[in-house]
Image (spheres, rainbow, N blue to C red):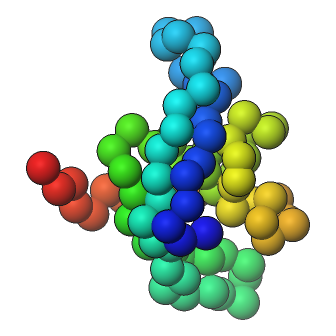
Amino acid sequence: MSGIEISQQTPQRVVHRRADLVRKRHVHSIRLDELTDEGYAYITVNCEGGLYVKELVSGDEGRTNPSLSGVLGVPALVEDLDVVNVDI
């Protein structure tokens, strides 16, 4: 999923306080850092500002396309999210 454009409709978790729009954002790269025996994947996402990363992973019931969950064909959720760097 590197170097692609993502279409994101305002996520369900924030639609009550934001306009329900479809936004185009870019994913520059996604790197798998670790895959555990328990089924956890640690990834690094390098993306354009404004991209909803949790929804990039889950797909948000079809509101984000493509999504990591959709590409892999398995349900995926973000359990923990850290912002490592913001370029200005």
The answer to whether 22 is drawn above or below residue 54 in the figure is: above
Residue 61's x, y, as percent? 80, 38
The answer to whether 12 is drawn above or below residue 42 in the figure is: above
In the rendered structure, the answer to whether residue 88 lies left or right of residue 2 reads left
The answer to whether 21 is drawn above or below residue 86 in the figure is: above
Identify the residue at horizontal 39%, vertical 38% (top origin): 50
Identify the residue at horizontal 80%, vertical 59% (top origin): 70
Residue 34's x, y, as percent? 54, 87
Let me know if residue 77 appears in the view: no
Identify the residue at horizontal 58%, vertical 19% (top origin): 21
The answer to whether 23 is drawn above or below residue 68 in the figure is: above
In the rendered structure, the answer to whether residue 80 lies left or right of residue 72 reads left
Identify the residue at horizontal 50%, vertical 67% (top origin): 3
Q: Nearer the viewer, residue 42 or 72?
A: 72
Instruction: Using the rendered view, name the quadrant where residue 49 is placed.
Output: top left
In the rendered structure, the answer to whether residue 78 lies left or right of residue 73 reads left
Q: Nearer the viewer, residue 57 or 19?
A: 19
Residue 14's x, y, as percent? 55, 21
Let me know if residue 82 appears in the view: yes
Outermost residue toward the left in this view: 88
Q: Quadrant of the N terminus?
A: bottom right
Instruction: Using the rendered view, name the quadrant where residue 44 is placed.
Output: bottom left
Residue 48's x, y, as percent? 37, 51
